[in-house]
Image (cartoon, grey):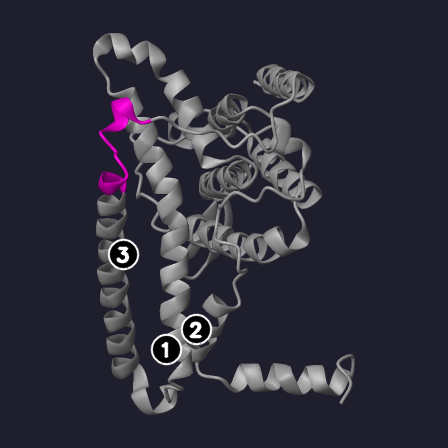
């Protein structure tokens, strides 16, 4: 049957819907892109590859501050700009599945925050006498205003809850997606070196800045190992052909619990092997360790100037709105 046949697509969708929830979760993990989350992708070269790592880190900090101080509509606009920048600079294979899952998570955060922030309104009792009891005319508001937007049984959505929901969802989306966008276009060595440069003044206070930089580099390297271990364990579980309907809820929880224990055991074993390999290769400590930069995509002064100008313009726009 041809691949473009709508009947084949419909039958495949029905088979996917008939699968148990456990199998669908396992398939979702296996269908994730082969590129580990937030790992550096050197090609294709984008304009973000040529921006210095220090400016990218400055952008991340400024973005979080701007979202915290901006209006709700501006927060949504900043999140949309981050999504648009991701789609314009990266190929679809890197952002399509990631943006879908991240949008789903942020949508759930928005819904639960909007419902639960003011779900139980406080009971207030006026201490002053009403105007009619004192012989004063009633005050009519100049414009209609309603604090409660929706009140349906036990669900209460107010202006405050919507504001908190927009802030939480936008901040979560921008924090995760902007950090991922920065790591995809920047080698880990450059991120570690840039962090050491920002923390250089703290050396006067005896802060171990080099140790912090090496720790950041090892953490970025370890993320790909976690992705690989999770994928390998899920592949092994899928190859066994477990009958999830026969397992039931309790059996499925036991299988996933064993899988989680095995994951941590493998990660601890890999960490020990990495530490032994570093010692064998002559690692004497963070102070004597030298980071070798990846000069594949060198930073451009023009790109750095454009990034700083855009950051200054965004800060001025938000300051004018405040």
Q: Tell me residue 134's x, y (percent).
A: 38, 26
Image quadrant assignment for residue 242:
bottom left
Residue at (36%, 26%) from the top-left corner?
Answer: 290
Image position, residue 168 (x, y; %): 45, 41
Specify whether 117 is left or right of 313: left
As for residue 298 lying within the magenta part, the answer is: no
Going from N to C along the chain, the mark reached first, 2 or 1, is 2
Q: Quadrant of the N terminus?
A: bottom right
Q: Where does the magenta region start and end?
A: 278-289
The mark found on residue 237 in the picture is 1
Q: Could you tell me which secondary element the residue under label 3 belongs to?
A: helix
Q: Which residue is mark 3?
A: 267
Q: Can residue 286 be found in the magenta stretch?
A: yes
Q: How many marks?
A: 3
Label annotation for residue 26 = 2
Residue at image x 48%, y 69%? 30
Q: What's the CA distance linking mark 2 and mark 1?
A: 9 Å
Mark 3 Cα within 10 Å, few/some/many (few <14, many 20+)? some
Identify the disc placed on residue 185: none
Pointers 2 and 3 in contact (C-beta within 8 Å)? no
- Tell me which label, 2 or 3, sits earlier in the chain: 2
Q: Quadrant of the C terminus?
A: top right
**CA separation in Å, label 1 and label 3:** 18 Å
Q: Secondary structure at mark 2?
A: helix
């Amino acid at each position: 049957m041809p691949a473009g046949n709508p009947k084949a697509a419909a039958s495949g969708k029905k088979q996917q819907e008939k699968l148990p929830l456990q199998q669908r979760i396992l398939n979702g993990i296996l269908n994730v892109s082969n590129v580990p989350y937030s790992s550096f992708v050197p090609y294709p070269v984008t304009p973000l590859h040529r921006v210095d790592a220090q400016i990218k880190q400055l952008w991340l900090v400024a973005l979080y501050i701007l979202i915290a101080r901006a209006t709700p509509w501006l927060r949504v606009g900043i999140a949309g700009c981050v999504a648009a920048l991701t789609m314009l600079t990266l190929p679809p294979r890197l952002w399509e599945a990631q943006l879908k899952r991240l949008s789903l998570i942020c949508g759930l955060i928005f819904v639960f925050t909007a419902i639960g922030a003011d779900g139980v309104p406080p009971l207030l009792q006026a201490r002053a006498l009403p105007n009619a009891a004192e012989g004063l005319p009633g005050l009519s508001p100049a414009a209609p205003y309603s604090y409660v937007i929706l009140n349906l049984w036990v669900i209460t959505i107010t202006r405050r809850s919507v504001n908190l929901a927009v802030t939480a969802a936008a901040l979560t989306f921008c924090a995760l997606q902007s950090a991922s966008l920065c790591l995809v276009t920047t080698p880990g060595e450059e991120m570690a070196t840039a962090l050491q440069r920002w923390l250089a003044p703290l050396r006067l206070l005896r802060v171990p800045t080099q140790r912090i930089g090496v720790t950041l580099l090892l953490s970025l390297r370890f993320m790909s190992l976690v992705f690989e271990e999770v994928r390998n364990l899920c592949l092994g579980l899928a190859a066994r052909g477990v009958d999830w309907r026969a397992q039931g809820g309790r059996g499925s929880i036991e299988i996933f619990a064993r899988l989680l224990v095995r994951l941590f055991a493998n990660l601890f074993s890999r960490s020990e092997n990495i530490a032994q390999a570093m010692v064998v290769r002559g690692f004497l400590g963070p102070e004597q360790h030298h980071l070798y930069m990846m000069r594949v995509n060198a930073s451009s002064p023009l790109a750095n100037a454009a990034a700083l100008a855009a950051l200054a313009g965004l800060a001025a726009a938000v300051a004018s709105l405040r």
